[in-house]
Image: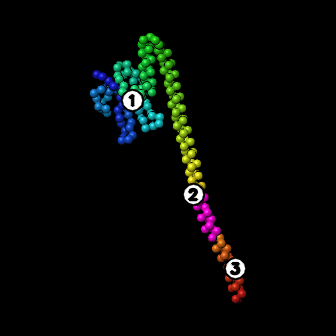
Amino acid sequence: MPVKIRLQRHGKKGKPFYWIVAADVRSKRDGKYLEKLGIYNPNTNPATIDLNVDGAVQWLQNGAQPTDTAKAILSYKGALLKNHLAGGVRKGALTEEQAEAKFTAWLEEKAGKVGAKTDGLAKAQAEAKATALKAEKAANEARIAAAAPVVEEEATEEVVAEETATEEAPAAEVEAKEEE
């Protein structure tokens, strides 16, 4: 029975979410599978991948063939490297401790790269937000400046009208007193 390590699609339309599974070649894409090895969510940046590396290595050693996308995911998470190192241990080129040390070093280096990408994305997002805020403030100031002269002219006309009214009011009071 030929086995493939492939993706099984889940999620809603336009928002794919995949399970990484070991399945019989003859089964449907979203049909029966032998074992669920992990998940893959391409909607996040960077993509979220949760993989049972030991289970994937076990299936690779038993002859399972990954599809192209699954192979890229397995490579990204280090399952292919661990399989390669396990082959070296079987042949006697490495000891188990050396292979584990190499795999751990690779995982740490990979985690550093992913962390750097995440930090870079967060920094770029913060810069974009700051730039948008500056542009919004400039637009608000321009709008206020454009509206301000109109308000001042109306205010000036109101002040002149009030001053005229106050000058006329005392004169009317004086006239009223003279008539008495």
Identity, as a three-letter code, of the amino acid under mark 1? Thr
Indicate the quadrant where residue 143 lies. Answer: bottom right
Q: Is residue 30 depicted above or below 160 in this figure? A: above
Mark 2 vs mark 3: give the one in front.
2
Residue 38 or residue 170, whichever sits in front: 170
The answer for how far apart the CA atoms under marks 2 and 1 are is: 52 Å
Could you tell me which quadrant the C terminus lies in? bottom right
Residue located at (71% from left, 83% from top): 174
Q: Is residue 55 depicted above or below 131 in this figure? A: above
Residue located at (70% from left, 88% from top): 179
In terms of secondary structure, where does tag 3 sit? helix
Whether residue 162 sits left or right of residue 77 in the image: it is: right
In terms of secondary structure, where does tag 2 sit? helix
In terms of secondary structure, where does tag 1 sit? helix
In magenta, the rendered stretch is: 145-157
Identity, as a three-letter code, of the amino acid under mark 2? Arg
Residue that protrudes farthest toward the top in the picture: 92
Residue that protrudes farthest toward the bottom in the picture: 180
- Indicate which disc residue 69 carries: 1
Question: Mark 2 and 3 residues: CB-CB less than 8 Å, in contact?
Answer: no
In the image, is residue 47 part of the stretch drawn in magenta?
no
Q: Which residue is mark 3?
A: 170
Indicate the quadrant where residue 124 lies. Answer: top right
